[in-house]
Amino acid sequence: VRRLLDGERLAPSFPGEHRALRLATDPAPNIPIHLAALGPAATRLAGELADGWCPFLLPCSALGDRIRILEQGTAASRQGRALPQICPSVPVAVSPDDDSRRIASWWVAFYLTSMGPLYQQTLRHLGHESAVDDVIAANPTHRTAEVPPSADVLLDELTIWGDATSARERLNRWFTAGAQLPILTLPPNRPLDELDHMLESLRPPEDGLPA
């Protein structure tokens, strides 16, 4: 990707009658490359090659271990390479009422039941087998998005939810765990005023540091 952005024409890496590839744009060598790596091997690759690392639906408690793998990838690459910026993508569900839990539950249930095996496998490997099983059992069809109390740990580990105060506290956990620039992922199909409330609730303080 970096070579393509630099304007190079790349020959195919497999045999056959294929033309070399070149982007139909002006060279843009300074565009940073961010990888949404989640598993250990992909995270190590991000450490070797990327400018930023953006895992999605990674438990907050697992961020530190993944950062160490990221560091290993950086150390194995060319000398003097900087560690990629740590930018976990975290689903947001902020509301002054009980709606926040419902939105957070949708995030967790949808991605565990409707988006293939990747997120299930990742969470199982990280010690959340029973919680994953309970969410899947609570949603036998795609018409529901329930997280039973026995799986509440997934809400806290994977999302930023609650009212403005508790959501800010949950966001600060990500900074404490090693996040440098968390990416706030807003829920789909919500009113604009509700999304504005979420962003305003989590706006950084004027000094730019976690509140």
Image (cartoon, helix red, strand yellow):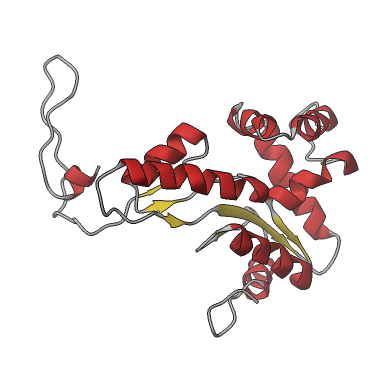
* Quadrant of residue 9 within the rendered picture: top left
The image position of residue 187, as x and y in percent, is 64, 54
- Residue 36 in sight: no
In the image: residue 133, left or right of residue 61? right
Work out which quarter of the rendered image holds the N terminus and state it.
top left
Numbered marks: total = 0
Q: Which residue lies at the image location 65% right of the left edge and 30% below the top edge?
A: 125
Q: Which residue lies at the image location 67% right of the left edge and 49% below the top edge?
A: 61
- Residue lying furthest right in this view? 149
Work out which quarter of the rendered image holds the C terminus and state it.
bottom right
Q: Which residue lies at the image location 11% right of the left edge and 17% below the top edge?
A: 17
- Residue lying furthest top in this view? 16
Please determine whether, in this image, residue 160 is positioned above or below residue 123.
below
The image position of residue 49, as x and y in percent, is 31, 44
Q: Which residue lies at the image location 15% right of the left edge and 34% below the top edge?
A: 21
The image position of residue 129, as x and y in percent, is 75, 30
* Quadrant of residue 167 within the rendered picture: bottom right
